[in-house]
Image (cartoon, rainbow, N blue to C red):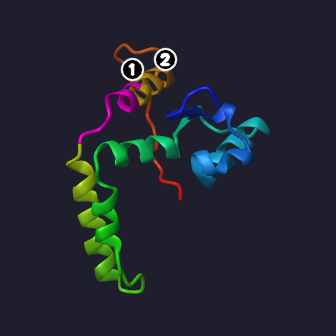
Amino acid sequence: MANNYVVWFKDIDKEDGPTVGGKGANLGEMTKAGFPVPNGFVVTVSAYQTFVDAAHIRSKIEEALHGLDVADSRALDKAALKVQHIITRSDFPKDIARDIIHAYFTLSGGGGIKHALVAVRSSH
């Protein structure tokens, strides 16, 4: 994979699961098999890890999740909101943002007024 932060579906296969997640790997496999998958890309695990480390929030996230009872839906909701708060209030590395924005505008046909409609999914 040429890019560290963004990878196009057409460049992904099942071996890339650790880099792009299970859903991303499946989308790549389906694309290569000729299924009618809309054009798209995956933001890599490396992008997430780089963001978390650059923003110095890994320990804050771990603290928010420490000792969490996954059977307690209220506790899960509370922890999710706390992690969301940590992430959304953190500085995002410009190089990752640039790569994602570039990929999005490529998906949109190079820019202009028309913007591609996209679905954003997480993969774990």
Q: Residue at x 73, y 43 (%)?
A: 30
- Residue 40, horizontal then vertical, whole percent: 56, 34
Q: Nearer the viewer, residue 94 or 38?
A: 94
Element type at marker 1?
Answer: loop
Residue at image position (40%, 32%) is: 96
The circle on residue 7 is: none
The image shows residue 33 at horizontal and vertical percentages of: 79, 39
Counting residues from the start of the chain, the first of labels 2 and 1 encountered is 2
Report the front residue among 43 and 66.
66
Do callouts 2 and 1 mark residues in contact (Cβ within 8 Å)? Answer: yes
Q: Is residue 30 magenta?
A: no
Find the magenta span and give its range: 91-98
Looking at the image, is 37 positioned above or below residue 58?
above
Residue at image point 25% right, 74% down:
78
Residue 13, quarter of picture: top right
Q: Is residue 98 left or right of residue 75?
A: right
What residue is pinned by disc 2?
109
Percent of width and height locating residue 9: 63, 35
In this picture, residue 26 sits left or right of residue 7: right
Q: Residues within 10 Å of mark 2 (few under 14, many from 20)?
A: few
Query: Of the residues shown, which amino acid type is indicated by label 1?
Result: Lys
Disc 2 secondary structure class? loop
Direction from residue 47 to residue 23 in the image, left or right: right
Judge from the rendering whether residue 23 lies leftward or rightward of residue 54; answer left or right.
right
What x and y, as percent, mark residue 90? 23, 46
Where 109 sits versus 1, above or below?
above
Q: Nearer the viewer, mark 2 or mark 1?
A: 2
The residue singled out by tag 1 in the image is 114
Category of crowding for the residue at label 1, using alpha-carbon neighbours closer than 10 angstroms: few (below 14), some (14–19), many (at least 20): few
